[in-house]
Image (spheres, helix red, strand yellow):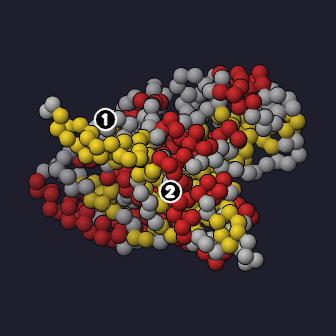
Amino acid sequence: MAKSNKTAISPTRGDDYAEWYQQVVKGADLAENAPVRGCMIIRPWGYSLWENVQGAMDRRFKETGHENAYFPLLIPLRFIEKEAAHVEGFAKEMAVVTHHRLEAQDGKLAPAAPLEEPMVIRPTSETIIGEAFAGWIRSYRDLPVKINQWANVMRWEMRPRLWLRTSEFLWQEGHTAHATEAEAREEVMTMLEIYREVVEEHMAVPVIPGEKSEGERFPGAVNTFTIEAMMQDGKALQSGTSHYLGQNFSKAANIRFQTENGDWEFCHTTSWGASTRLIGGLIMTHGDDDGLRVPPRIAPDHVVIVPIIRDEAQQGPVMDYAETIAKRLRGQSFDGAPVRVRIDGRKIASQEKKWDWVRKGVPVTLEVGPRDVEAGGAALARRDRVRDKKEILSLDEIAGQLEELLWGIQSNLFEEAKAYRSARCRDDIAGFDDFKAYFDAMKGNTFNGDGGFVRAWWCEDAATEDQLKELGVTVRCLPLDQPGGEGPCVLTGKPAKRMAIFAKSY
């Protein structure tokens, strides 16, 4: 595996992109399939990635006045029935609990007692949180209410894929209530910007913020806003959404407040969410044929020290020196906190350790052996660069350069992904025939192939979205960054006032 003509992951992206993805998840010890169909077991390295993304978001949520709370996993069916559009959007994905208590029947356990009312395992919590808001809010003095929940949800997935589409997944869902539409809309855009900040600035994944089309809107919402990222096969991944719900949910749940004038009005509500799907996006944005590459700001470890020990006599001096390096580097800071350093002291071959951390994508590895002990240095390798390129540096040089080095890796991964997206985004397609040909070329393995995003004028006619489905394409968003003016719709030729991003997607 250490030979230059081999890769740590097989197959490569060019051979079989879909299988490559599965092997990166496996090789980096991120997750595995659970005994329950469509669910996954998140392993420590994968969960640490999620915790670091979670921490970056949670800090921003609290800085903008939100408080964390928790609501029940089970939602009474009558709550779901109150919002017809919401039910229609999620009905086929809902898991329903109908019984409690198990009894032995013919030597097997079987459900025994039907519930008086079926319970839905939350696909999202708008309905039950709306019920709570209706009890909490009485006056304009109670507003705004700004709540976030870190939780798991269940949406029965027919074609599961680890991190991207699982029946159960982890996420956060924010829910707020406001006295005015203007205040609610400001909230929606504030949260969208938080998602952009975390995904671009911490995960180093470039995104396009925009508004969802009517056909892609969250069920029951007035407007849905999104951030869309491009994966290395040219497909889009929705990476966070923020919804203005208007008064739709407040009317269904009777969330009202008394104004200063003594009148009663319905609140304007919002919801917004991002999930563990972001880790799937991380893999497909930064992964290479040797495995995962992790941006330092969300890396569980910034530096892993790999002792190179060939006989027992070397064990003590090399491990002692590794501890000296770790202590020195932990005294350095990165991103406002101490550098996270791990010594890999496992009793396995040094080469196996090295490739394990390559697959996991740790930003920096330091190999230390007896010669390094004598010289007071180490062999440093950056995961964002060619794997066989190492620098022999002194401990002083490593400590002095480490913060700048980690920021350099963070920036390099972002710029590399941004350049890749730019190379696969067309803004010169003006007619349907060229549009169709562009997306028809996206067949089979599209890693480094034809196709990607199209940015073009769109008349926003809902009927054209059905036309797009025949091509396997969707309107990913109407970007917030618009050129102004108008142009001919790429699908119909009709006058259009906004441009859209069109793509195949996950």
The C terminus sits in image quarter: top right
Residue 128: numbered disc = 2
Q: What x and y, as percent, mark residue 80?
A: 52, 48
Judge the density around disc 2: few (<14), some (14-19), many (≥20) Cα neighbours within 10 Å. Answer: many
- Horizontal side of 258 relative to 321 (left or right) equals right
Viewer-proximal residue among 242 and 357 = 242
Q: Residue at x 85, y 48 (%)?
A: 484
Camera-side residue: 370 or 91? 91
Drawn side of residue 62 relative to residue 343, left or right: right
Give the residue at mark 1: 1
- Amino acid type at circle 2 is Ile
Q: How many labels does the image show?
A: 2
| The quadrant where residue 424 appears | top right
Looking at the rendered structure, the secondary structure element under dot 1 is loop
Q: Quadrant of the rendered structure where residue 154 is?
A: top left
- Mark 1 to mark 2: distance in Å? 53 Å
